[in-house]
Amino acid sequence: MEAGGPVIPVPLAAFGLFGEAFNFVFSGTEAQTGGVTVGGPEQVLDLAARQLEVTLFALGVAIFLALPVGLWLGHRQKGEFLAVSAGNAGRAIPELALIALMAAAIGVGMVNLVVALAILGIPPILTNTYVGISQVDRASVEAARGMGMTELAIVRKVELPLAVPTIMGGVRTAAINIIATATIAPLAGILTLGDFIIARNVYGDAGVLAGAVLVAMMALALEASLAGIQWAMTSKGLKLERS
Amino acid sequence: MTAESVSASTVRFESVTKRYSGAESVAVEDLSFEVPAGEICVLVGPSGCGKTTALRMVNRTVEMTSGDILIGGNSVKEGDPARLRREIGYVIQQIGLFPHRTISQNIGTVPNLLGWDKERVAKRSAELLELIGLDPEYGDRYPTQLSGGQQQRVGVARALAVDPPVMLMDEPFGAIDPINRSRLQNEFLRLQAELRKTVLFVTHDVDEAIKMGDKVAVLKKGGQLAQFATPTELLMEPADDFVEDFVGSDRALKRLALMRVRDVNLWTAPLAQAGDPAEPVRTAVAAAEVPHALLVDGENRPQGWLSERDLAGERVPSTPDSLTEPLIEADSILRDGLAALLQSGSLYAAVVDHRGRLTGVLSVEIVSDFLASDKAAESELTAVERPHG
Amino acid sequence: MAELLAAVDDSFFTDRTGGGCIQENKLFCPGWVADNYDRYVDPTLQHLVLVGSAVVAGFLIAFALGVFAHRHRFLQTPFLAGTGILYTIPSISFFFLLLPITGRGALTAIIALTAFNLQIIFRNMTNGLRNVPQNVTEAATGIGMTKSQVLWQVELPLAMPEIIAGLRIATVSTVALATLAVFANGGGLGTEIVSGSNITFKTGIIVAGSIAVIMAIVFDGMLLLAGKLLAPWKRVAQ
């Protein structure tokens, strides 16, 4: 700002930085460290793809591990303490410390990162699956048993469909945790969109802001997709009941 | 009415109509009747007849579309609805006690809203607990710690807290099991005999209507008044086919609900106390209306029926062969008395007052005599006024 | 990450009693912790301020939104969607969305953490109010309570256990998330994880992470206790 010149109001200044961020994404800018060009569509897409890949991979592992356990505990109506405390404990884990410790103690790399992220995703899925299944009206389950369904069929055809909204709630919480934490994956040696945010000395404020916007958009898009999947998976009868 | 009726007001419906917005038909149509001060008026009818809507327009939890309701001559439409409601006792089927407040705090809700001081609220809560027959220690408990019947009593006490001239009761005993319902009904009638409130009482159960009502307003679908009459009139002269149908084909039996056990001529049985000589009792039994002797204690409370074997010895034993089951309260209606008698399979039952003291013996014969006399009266009426009935 | 690493002073790896523990960067060096516990005091206090401010602000805003949406039901869905978006945006991204407006610092971190909290508290409050049995509010109205008396004397006290449950979730999550405030120059325990040395100093990570976990447990326990004290009717035997 020039002395004596008109004072630029904050929103306009903000707009200026957003403009730079826009440039950063679509054409790239020179690195703060000089020389090379950073940003640009190619790098953005590359990092975005990596973040999505890491997120979906970790989410898949978390579902694969937590869902069967939650289903089994919920169906047997056992292990409430375990399932619920897992959820509480999961929330208390500082994501930053977890990623940092995994990287420092076990090493950087894709597998370690996915394990760390999956650890964050397991508790909400486990808890919600347990709660969703165990809250299914016991009369429905008894009726199914009375009609001669096997236990596996009861889980598959009665409990699971009725618990879809709750289970998906857990999956969505897990997804948000994982994609948010995948942003700091560069600390564990995997470059995601978070690199724009963390390595400010390379990308500058425009890169930081661009990274923030991209991560936010990506998280919202993931959340919206999962909400859509949940809608598609929920039986019509349940939807009617809720409205 | 006695001098106690000062705390009651008449309630008058004047062409009250309710049309819910968006609904095609009216919920209540042109309803007019008057409940005299101190009486119970039961609104009864099939579901969807607008009885609850009619009740709720009195305290404006539902606003009427047209017409007016006057309490003691004043329109309910004047003034603030919240203030109006504080002056009208309100009891609903699901009771609606506040789970987070103790029983005393629940009962003291309206007094607190009216700004009574703490001491006065506490005193009133204690009074009401006693009135509904709960130990003072219940005052510090929470609603979940009480049985359904106890909760409903507290609901009534809460409604009575500021001694309102009018009480609205919306199926108050609907969620209670039959045995306790009958007990609560009797208790409420006993309370009402003392308090003389003007009560509007909604039920779908015609038996309850006949038992509880001084007046019964029968509503049909669309909220029209089919008949407004005393229970006797309702049973004797149903206004139309709808009412006749609704009241049911067992009208004669239902008339048993109009009488209390204490109102019929009970029989007497020979009495004996433990340790009395047996000989005079044996003689008395041979000559008595009831051919069995009753063992009573010093306060005339029945202890059991004495069998021939009990009386075979020199002295009357203290533990008779059969207990006094069933034991019927003099305040219960005749229908319940008969039901108890039939259920137990015995010919006679001891009748006691609310302190448990013997007032007489009820037999199936007494009931059938009563029915025979009344049935005659009813068929006479039918012959005169309803030639095609 | 030169900026972060610049904070490291040369004496960091020397002057300690742990023998070779630090030099070898073993998983946990108690000797170093004994010598350096005082370096955690400030970050811990900063962390408390971050969490406390974000939870209190989040509670006040969500509570006001909850009361407002209770009066005007049609607002519930938009409020839920709006707070849902704020909840979904990762905090670390939120810090830097605020960068052009509030710059770097604790305030930025507090705003982002508050935004994260709103949804959790609002949703629990809405559920709590919705779960108040209808017969209870009906009776409250029927015996002459005004709308606001019903709200403050009946509905909110009955919804309180669920509101506190939401507050517990929000608080515990915020304690964990506040470690990220370091990226916004907001201080807190994250400074001891990232800039403590480089991020490969295991003992530092473990100590800072443990303090955060303990803080979460303590807050959770306090709120649990407060909830029990405030809801005596929940404690009585059925």
Image (cartoon, rainbow, N blue to C red):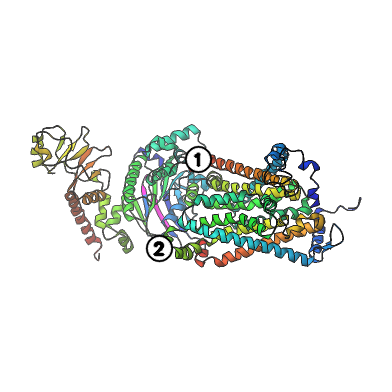
Q: Whole-percent x and y of residue A243? A: 53, 62
* Residue count near mark 1 (Cα–Cα under 10 Å), binned few <14, some 14–19, many ≥20: few
Residue closest to the eye, B188 or B226 = B188
Residue closest to the eye, B211 or A152 = A152
As drawn, is B86 to the left or to the right of A107? Answer: left
Badge 1 marks a residue whose secondary structure is helix
Residue A243 appears in the picture as rendered = no
Per the model, the C-alpha gap separating discs 1 and 2 is 40 Å
Q: Chain of mark 2?
A: A
Which contiguous range is marked in magenta? B30-40
Mark nearer the viewer, 1 or 2: 2
Q: Residue at x 50, y 35 (%)?
A: B116
Q: Is residue B15 above or below residue B136?
A: below
Overall secondary structure of the magenta stretch?
A: strand
Q: Whole-percent x and y of residue C194? A: 73, 49
> In which quarter of the view is residue C41 placed?
top right
Residue closest to the eye, C224 or B17 = C224
Q: Residue furthest front?
A: C20
Q: Whole-percent x and y of residue B295? A: 17, 37
> In which quarter of the view is residue B197 placed?
top left
Give the number of the disc on residue B325.
Answer: none
Q: Is residue B32 magenta?
A: yes
Q: Whole-percent x and y of residue B230? A: 31, 52
Badge 2 marks a residue whose secondary structure is helix
Q: What type is the residue that disc 2 sits on?
A: Arg
Q: How many marks?
A: 2
Q: What type is the residue that disc 1 sits on?
A: Pro
Q: Are marks 1 and 2 on the same chain?
A: no
Query: Which residue in the protein does label 2 denote?
Result: A145
Q: Chain of mark 1?
A: C
Query: Which residue in the protein does label 1 denote?
Result: C232
